[in-house]
Image (cartoon, coloured by chain):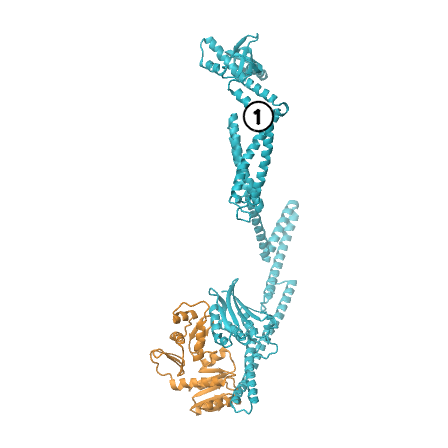
């Protein structure tokens, strides 16, 4: 039983989120402005905050800054702005994730679950050797397994090899041809998009929203890279 | 005949025949000319024969005279000399058809080789000189005229050869008179006049020069009519062969076009020059010819060398005419074109110089030239006062001109900058005068108006984009509730199927609204250009293979086959990878929505004229009754009924984003074929 604080100035949205989260075995606390949210967070033992950005009075960013002064709990921003600059601003101020409105309830539940698992279960514990970790993605090269926020992801051998290559060099961009040469051990054929298809499949398995990847990024016209969006 | 034209052997044989025929023709014509000149056609050759006999007899007169001299000296000495034996043998009956008698004035025969029946005779009076006695005399004359008169008479009497003279003048010192002294030396002979009569024997028994001469002459005369026939027929043949050769020139077996050999490529005037030089050499060689035989051999060689040379030249000329290179392939033509090019270049350069010269220079140069001209005129015709006046007038005018030019220049510069869009440029009006200042103020006013207009335009565009963004954000919040509660409603126990159907409609329309709000924001941003564009060298092959990979599964679900063909080489363009992906994401999801199931989708990259061209083709599921241009308008969709999903902004966004990156976006609709072409300049 985890305690989740939902803060939005739109009461209908708060109510809807409460219904979803309650069914997912969460204790939900409600707030309708920044001040209220901070008050609840100070009083209760909150494990996660869902915070709207555009609120009258103290907005989400300001509330988050105040909250971060004495708390390390995961915060997911709810935003109507879909521009990258807004997302980056939120992540820089201390948010752990963001969801753009209008959101899909399933996605909200998945992200809440993911953040809680990382915060409470994994807790940044000791990393074993031979285990590569980027954000919530862990690749154990000894056991040949991949887990996302603790949940196992079933990758095909090719997908596993691609992911391992990318995770061994976090932040490095690999072109499709380089990936093909390394993983397939063959010279790449001219108009082949096998790598792109595989990467797409990997994203579907390790990302909550494959269209907006947090870990496996597409660098258009150059290649692919693994990195933690938060860093 | 036509088939023979290109054959080499035909040309070769014709060429050889031509040479032979020409030689024959020339020989015949020469023969006919000689015969006609000698009157052979009129009198059957009698006169020619007579002339030949006369020249033979006449040629021998001097020799006979010499013979007689040798004979006389031998008589005096009383012994036979070697020279005499030579003459005796030469004029012996068996060696010579020529015989002679030398008679003195009284008719006594002094010498004769033999006598016989003769067919021709000719008598010549001949003066013989013997016993040379040298004489020397010195004479004094009072005048130069008298002296030369005397000398003349000596020359006349004794001949130029035997008289040698030297002269001098003496001046008497007392009287001052000048006298002329002449010293002459000459030879006086004993002179005897004899008659030498030469005969040509009737029957030419000896095989001497006369025999051969007359033999050939008779042959020539008897063949006189044949010669005309031979000449005429060989002339006809020659002309026919020439026609054939000229028409065959330039044709080569197996080639349709006119074939030019290396020889035909030599400039024509150079070739003519070489030929003229060769002609000069031939003429110079003709000078060393002495005898008749040599002349004949020489003439033959000239004909055999020059007929082929001229033939080759004519054939080459014919080839050139056919190929149209007669005028162009000349050194002179080449030179003239070079000169023309150079002059044109010079002229254009001059024009360019004048055009691009700044106002200062144009005015300065013009003014200086005019002043110089005036000065010359004034210096030549004017007085001192005019000159002084002119000088001061020029001084004042020059100052005024400089002022005007500076003002003009400043106005010109300002107008140019404002026209180029520099709306914050103000023309500096300090030190400007009168009308120019007023004009400058006007220009500044125009600039102010322009600046205001531009500012307002920018402001309104920004406001519009902001408005759309804000409105769409405000829509998103209630939309979130709608989406969520529709989802919740779906999970509730609904009474009837109709209710479930209605919820499904709600859900679908909520999704559409969501997509629409996102697209409206993106479209407004893309069209106002308020999206940051980060142009980088981007590999189109990589980007499109990535995009294709993203959509492969989705297409497979709809039974669409994506045929992706990358360009052969890496194709780099300057583009923003993320924006370009959004372009393709829009286009490919359009394909997913509108392409006919079970068809192929073609995505290809080409390089055409320095541009990377991407084309995406698919077969539409619905008939496309609109043009490509219309499809790119906002809110236009292939199906006018608007029953399908999508906002109708996808193509408009794709076009705006492409244009933001400096690309060209084009849509072609051909029946059910829908084709998008995007091109960028390669980097």
Q: Nearer the viewer, residue B263 or A75?
A: B263
- Residue B622, relative to residue B292: is it above or below? below
Can residue A162 be seen in the rendering of this structure? yes
Question: Percent x, y for residue B433?
Answer: 63, 62
Q: Chain B hue?
A: cyan
Residue B359 pos. (x, y %): 60, 58
Q: Which chain is orange?
A: A
Name the residue carrying label 1.
B220
Number of on-image labels: 1
Q: Is residue B630 above or below residue B190?
A: below
Label 1 crowd (10 A; few <14 / some 14-19 / many >=20): some
**Left or right: A37 as drawn, with respect to B368:** left
Q: Is residue B539 visible?
A: no
Q: Secondary structure at mark 1?
A: helix
Please state which of residues B141 and A62 is positioned toward the viewer in this rendering: A62
Which of the two residues, B210 or B535, is positioned nearer the viewer here? B210
Seen in the image, is A71 located left or right of residue B223?
A: left
Residue B145 x/y as whole percent:
59, 17
Percent x, y of residue B470 = 56, 81
Q: Quadrant of residue B637?
A: bottom right
Pointer 1 chain:
B
Quadrant (top left, top right, bottom left, bottom right) of the N terminus of chain B: top right
């Amino acid at each position: 039983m985890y305690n989740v604080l939902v803060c939005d100035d739109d009461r209908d949205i708060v109510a809807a989120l409460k219904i979803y989260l309650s069914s997912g075995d969460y204790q939900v606390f409600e707030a309708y402005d920044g001040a209220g949210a901070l008050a609840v967070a100070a009083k209760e033992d909150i494990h996660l905050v869902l915070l709207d950005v555009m609120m009258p009075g103290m907005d989400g960013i300001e509330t988050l800054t105040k909250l971060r002064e004495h708390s390390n709990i995961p915060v997911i921003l709810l935003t109507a702005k879909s521009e990258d600059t807004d997302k980056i601003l939120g992540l820089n101020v201390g948010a752990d994730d963001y969801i753009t409105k209008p959101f899909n309830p399933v996605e909200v539940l998945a992200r809440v679950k993911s953040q809680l698992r990382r915060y409470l279960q994994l807790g940044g514990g000791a990393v074993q050797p031979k285990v590569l970790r980027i954000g919530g993605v862990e690749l154990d090269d000894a056991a040949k397994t991949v887990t996302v926020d603790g949940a196992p992801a079933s990758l095909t051998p090719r997908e596993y090899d691609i992911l391992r290559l990318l995770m061994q060099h976090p932040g490095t961009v690999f072109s499709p041809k380089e990936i093909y040469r390394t993983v397939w051990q063959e010279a790449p054929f001219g108009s082949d998009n096998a790598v792109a298809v595989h990467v797409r499949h990997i994203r579907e398995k390790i990302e909550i929203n494959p269209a907006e990847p947090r870990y496996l990024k597409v660098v258009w016209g150059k290649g692919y890279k693994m990195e933690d969006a938060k860093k | 005949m036509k088939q023979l034209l290109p054959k080499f052997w035909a040309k070769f044989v014709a060429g050889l025949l031509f040479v032979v025929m020409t030689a024959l023709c020339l020989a015949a014509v020469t023969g006919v000319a000689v015969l006609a000149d000698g009157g052979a056609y009129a009198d059957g050759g009698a006169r020619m024969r007579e002339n030949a006999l006369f020249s033979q007899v006449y040629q021998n007169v001097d020799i006979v005279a010499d013979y007689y001299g040798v004979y006389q000296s031998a008589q005096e000495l009383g012994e036979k000399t070697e020279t005499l034996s030579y003459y005796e043998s030469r004029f012996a009956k068996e060696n010579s058809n020529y015989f002679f008698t030398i008679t003195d004035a009284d008719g006594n025969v002094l010498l004769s080789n033999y006598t016989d029946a003769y067919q021709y005779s000719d008598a010549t009076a001949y003066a013989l000189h013997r016993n040379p006695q040298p004489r020397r005399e010195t004479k004094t004359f009072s005048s130069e005229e008298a002296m030369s008169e005397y000398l003349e008479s000596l020359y006349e009497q004794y001949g130029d050869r035997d008289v040698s003279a030297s002269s001098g003048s003496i001046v008497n010192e007392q009287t001052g008179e000048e006298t002329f002294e002449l010293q002459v030396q000459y030879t006086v002979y004993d002179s005897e006049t004899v008659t030498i009569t030469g005969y040509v024997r009737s029957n030419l028994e000896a095989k001497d020069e006369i025999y051969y001469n007359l033999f050939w002459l008779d042959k020539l005369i008897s063949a006189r009519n044949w010669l005309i026939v031979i000449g005429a027929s060989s002339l006809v043949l020659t002309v026919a062969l020439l026609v054939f050769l000229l028409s065959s020139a330039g044709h080569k077996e197996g080639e349709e076009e006119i074939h030019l050999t290396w020889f035909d490529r030599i400039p024509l005037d150079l070739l003519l020059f070489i030929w003229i030089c060769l002609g000069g050499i031939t003429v110079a060689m003709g000078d060393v010819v002495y005898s008749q035989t040599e002349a004949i051999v020489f003439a033959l060689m000239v004909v055999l060398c020059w007929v082929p040379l001229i033939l080759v030249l004519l054939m080459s000329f014919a080839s050139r005419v056919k190929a149209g290179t007669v005028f162009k392939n000349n050194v002179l033509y080449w030179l003239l074109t070079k000169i023309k090019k150079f002059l044109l270049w010079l002229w254009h350069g001059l024009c360019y110089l004048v055009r691009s010269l700044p106002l200062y220079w144009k005015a300065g140069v013009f003014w200086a030239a005019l002043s110089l001209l005036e000065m010359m005129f004034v210096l030549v015709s004017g007085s001192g006062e005019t000159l002084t006046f002119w000088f001061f007038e020029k001084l004042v005018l020059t100052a005024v001109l400089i002022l005007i030019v500076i003002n003009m220049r400043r106005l010109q510069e300002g107008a140019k900058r404002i026209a180029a869009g520099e709306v914050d440029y103000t023309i500096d009006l300090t030190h400007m005068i009168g009308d120019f200042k007023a004009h400058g103020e006007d220009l500044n006013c125009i600039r102010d108006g322009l600046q205001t207009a531009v500012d307002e335009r920018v402001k309104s565009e920004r406001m519009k984009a902001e408005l759309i963004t804000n409105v769409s954000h405000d829509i998103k919040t209630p939309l979130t509730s709608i989406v969520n509660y529709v989802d919740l409603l779906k999970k509730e126990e609904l009474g009837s199927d109709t209710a479930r159907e209605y919820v499904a409609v709600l859900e679908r329309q909520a999704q559409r609204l969501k997509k629409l709000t996102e697209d409206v924001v993106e479209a407004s941003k893309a069209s106002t250009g308020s999206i940051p564009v980060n142009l980088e060298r981007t590999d189109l092959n990589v980007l499109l293979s990535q995009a294709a990979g993203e959509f492969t599964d989705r297409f497979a679900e709809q039974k669409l086959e994506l045929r992706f063909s990358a360009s052969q080489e890496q194709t780099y363009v300057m583009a923003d990878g993320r924006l370009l992906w959004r372009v393709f994401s829009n286009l490919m999801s359009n394909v997913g929505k509108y392409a006919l199931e079970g068809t192929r989708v073609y995505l290809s990259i080409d390089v055409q004229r320095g541009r990377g061209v991407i084309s995406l083709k698919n077969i539409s599921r619905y008939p496309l009754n609109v043009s490509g241009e219309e499809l790119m308008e906002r809110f236009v969709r292939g199906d006018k009924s608007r029953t399908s999903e999508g906002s109708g902004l996808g193509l408009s966004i794709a076009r705006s984003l492409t244009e933001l990156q400096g690309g060209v976006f084009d849509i072609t609709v051909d029946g059910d074929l829908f084709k998008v072409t995007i091109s960028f300049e390669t980097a």
